[in-house]
Image (tube, grey):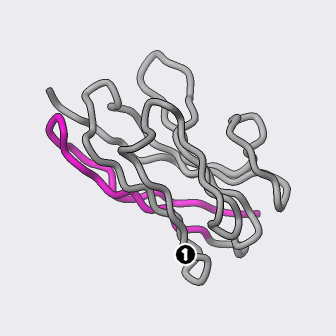
Amino acid sequence: QVQLVETGGGLVQDGGSLRLSCTASGRAIKNYTMGWFRQAPGKEREFVAAISWGGGGTYYSDSVKGRFVISRDNAKNTVTLQMNSLKPEETAVYYCAAPKSLFTFAVTSQVYEYWGRGTQVTASA
């Protein structure tokens, strides 16, 4: 079992930045792809970014490419999402997730087994 806890959410103005962190426990995540998803009120959960187990591969949704950066520190069992130029429409609960299987790179939520409780990000207009 992998337990995930997200921190770093908050309120920023349109165009502002936030840095989210995800801390894992229960198991080392060094062999897991790690992903970030978000869910706005009344909308489905959507993929934001993913990083491969070694950190050498990253993938972003088109909507955040060039503004968000995902990174990881396997020694600290953490994953980070740096979010820049935030837009009001990106207000959502942001979730950290890991798939059930090791060495599995995926961008669809159905593949992800372990989820944190999420952290609220609000970008005001």
Q: Is residue 43 above or below residue 110?
A: above
Helix, strand or loop status at disc 1: strand
Q: Is residue 21 above or below residue 54?
A: above
Q: Position of residue 105 (x, y in %)?
A: 76, 50
Question: Which residue: 70% across, 57% down?
Answer: 33
Q: For the view shown, which residue lies furthest in the bottom direction?
A: 75
Q: Position of residue 104 (x, y in %)?
A: 81, 53
Quarter of the image with the C terminus is: top left
Q: Number of labelled discs?
A: 1
Question: Residue 106: percent from the left, percent from the top?
Answer: 74, 44
Q: Nearer the viewer, residue 111 or 119?
A: 111
User: Which sits in the foreground, 30 or 122?
Assistant: 30
Q: Main secondary structure of the magenta part?
A: strand
Magenta-span inclusion, residue 2: yes
Q: Residue at x 71, y 75 (%)?
A: 28
- The image quadrant that residue 46 belongs to is top right
Start and end of the magenta stretch?
A: 1-24
Disc 1 residue type (three-letter): Asp
Q: Would residue 44 be counted in the magenta stretch? A: no
- Local crowd at mark 1 within 10 Å, few (<14), some, or many (≥20)? some
Residue lying at 27% horizontally and 38% vertically, measured from the top left: 86
On the rendered image, what quadrant is the N terminus found in? bottom right
Q: Residue at x 14, y 38 (%)?
A: 13
Identify the residue under disc 1: 73
Coordinates of residue 80 in the picture (x, y in percent): 46, 62
